[in-house]
């Protein structure tokens, strides 16, 4: 299903949200619909913003704030109860819902992110042992500079990430959505298929090289050990926080013709358009010990040491600014949704919510913004983009 909504600068985030909700297929027979799908989706997004982490809380919040919801949609029959919310969210096609999310982000925040991190996260309590169902694993794309979720793809487990990442890249790349971006992914994605997908999207890759690519890693290690300092670019930065001091020395080399030559071993990893290799030597001073680690990366972009350091550091923002916030502030790891498509669709709802909450020009923490949205409807309207900050 193709998604085409015309962007106008004056359109509010909420209007764009409702437009994209309207093109998600409703699986019900229309003559039996008392609660149209856009009303249901607006309810769950608003309830999730307003500190509700399950269907019972969302339904109760909707009953208490029906007048607020009717500012935007009719809600002729009120709001559905928790049981109906469960049934409806289980039946929505998660692929279409994810596509609507990506299209909404592109329309509402048209400026492309220049640093994009892709990583997976497991919702640990979404498993169903009795049915032999593994917990939900979601691969997400995160614009680290603007701290926006750009899209997501659900997979059966972590081992299937390599199949999901090209699908996510293809969706993000639609209409030039990844053009000129630098996409960073952990070592699981260091393979020609994913690297080619990123290059086909007119973007550059920054991929970790770990033990799962032993030959490539050994060659890069040997190169840096033997290279003349005059041929390398190096920068050192210091990071303090969370009870530790970490010093990182980032070294890059752009003389990589030896990696792309024709005299290679059969079956060796051959990534397209290699332009830079990166070494990160990190020393962390903890309270009771020191920790040393050396990491290696490979990129299609002609990076300077400063740019490589920024990109490597930014990649881990997906852990701190997205995964940690979803678990600690939105309670995602405690969610026990297990049947149908509910877990996948509510994961997307949380992404809608976190983007909207973050967009507010407010010094409060995300946790306090959610709580304030619970008791102050005009503040929630501000989050939705309906009132000025």
Image (tube, rainbow, N blue to C red):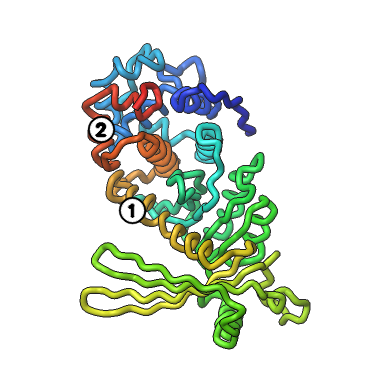
Image height check: is 381 above or below 134? above
Question: Which disc is residue 3 wearing?
Answer: none
In depth, the one of 93 and 363 nearer the eye is: 363
Residue at x 42%, y 41% (from the top left corner)? 351
**Mark 2 residue crowding within 10 angstroms, few (<14) / some (14–19) / many (20+):** some
Residue at x 45%, y 74% (from the top left corner)? 249
**Mark 1 residue crowding within 10 angstroms, few (<14) / some (14–19) / many (20+):** some
Residue 232 image offset from top left, x and y in percent? 58, 77
Image height check: is 341 above or below 44? below
Marks counted in the figure total: 2
| Outermost residue to the bottom | 226
Image height check: is 77 above or below 143? above
Residue at x 37%, y 51% (from the top left corner)? 321
Residue at x 58%, y 86% (from the top left corner)? 222
Secondary structure of residue under mark 1: helix
How far, Cα to Cα, is label 1 from label 2? 22 Å
- Counting residues from the start of the chain, the first of labels 1 and 2 encountered is 2
Quadrant showing the C terminus = top left
Question: Which disc is residue 57 wearing?
Answer: 2
Q: Which residue is mark 1?
A: 324
Quadrant showing the N terminus = top right
């Amino acid at each position: 299903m193709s998604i085409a909504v015309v962007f106008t600068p004056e359109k509010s985030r909420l209007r764009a949200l409702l437009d994209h909700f309207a093109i998600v297929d409703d699986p019900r027979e229309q003559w039996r619909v008392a609660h149209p799908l856009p009303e249901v989706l607006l309810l769950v997004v608003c309830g999730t913003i307003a500190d509700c982490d399950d269907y019972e809380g969302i339904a109760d919040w909707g009953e208490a704030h029906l007048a607020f919801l009717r500012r935007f949609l009719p809600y002729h029959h009120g709001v559905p109860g928790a049981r109906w919310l469960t049934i409806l969210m289980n039946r929505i096609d998660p692929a279409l819902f994810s596509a609507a999310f990506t299209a909404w982000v592109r329309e509402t925040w048209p400026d492309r992110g220049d640093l994009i991190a892709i990583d997976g996260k497991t919702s640990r309590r979404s498993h169903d042992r009795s049915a032999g169902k593994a917990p939900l694993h979601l691969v997400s794309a995160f614009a680290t500079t603007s701290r926006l979720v750009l899209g997501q793809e659900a997979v059966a487990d972590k081992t299937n990430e390599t199949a999901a990442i090209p699908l996510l890249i293809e969706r993000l790349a639609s209409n030039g959505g990844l053009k000129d971006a630098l996409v960073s992914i952990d070592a699981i994605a260091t393979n020609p298929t994913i690297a080619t997908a990123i290059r086909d999207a007119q973007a550059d890759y920054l991929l970790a090289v770990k033990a799962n690519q032993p030959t490539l890693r050994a060659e890069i290690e040997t190169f840096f050990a033997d290279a003349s300092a005059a041929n390398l670019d190096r920068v050192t930065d210091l990071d303090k926080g969370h009870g530790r001091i970490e010093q990182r020395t980032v070294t890059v080399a752009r003389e990589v013709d030896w990696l792309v030559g024709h005299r290679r071993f059969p079956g060796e990893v051959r990534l397209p358009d290699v332009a830079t290799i990166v070494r990160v030597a990190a020393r962390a001073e903890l309270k009771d010990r020191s920790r040393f680690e050396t990491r290696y990366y490979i990129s299609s972009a002609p990076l300077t040491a400063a740019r490589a350091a920024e990109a490597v550091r930014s990649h881990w923002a997906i852990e701190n600014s997205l995964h940690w916030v979803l678990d600690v502030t939105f309670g995602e790891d405690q969610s026990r949704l297990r049947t149908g498509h509910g877990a996948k669709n509510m994961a997307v709802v949380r992404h809608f919510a976190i983007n909207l909450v973050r967009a507010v020009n407010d010094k409060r923490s995300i946790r306090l913004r959610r709580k304030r949205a619970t008791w102050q409807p005009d503040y929630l309207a501000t989050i939705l983009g309906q009132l000025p900050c």
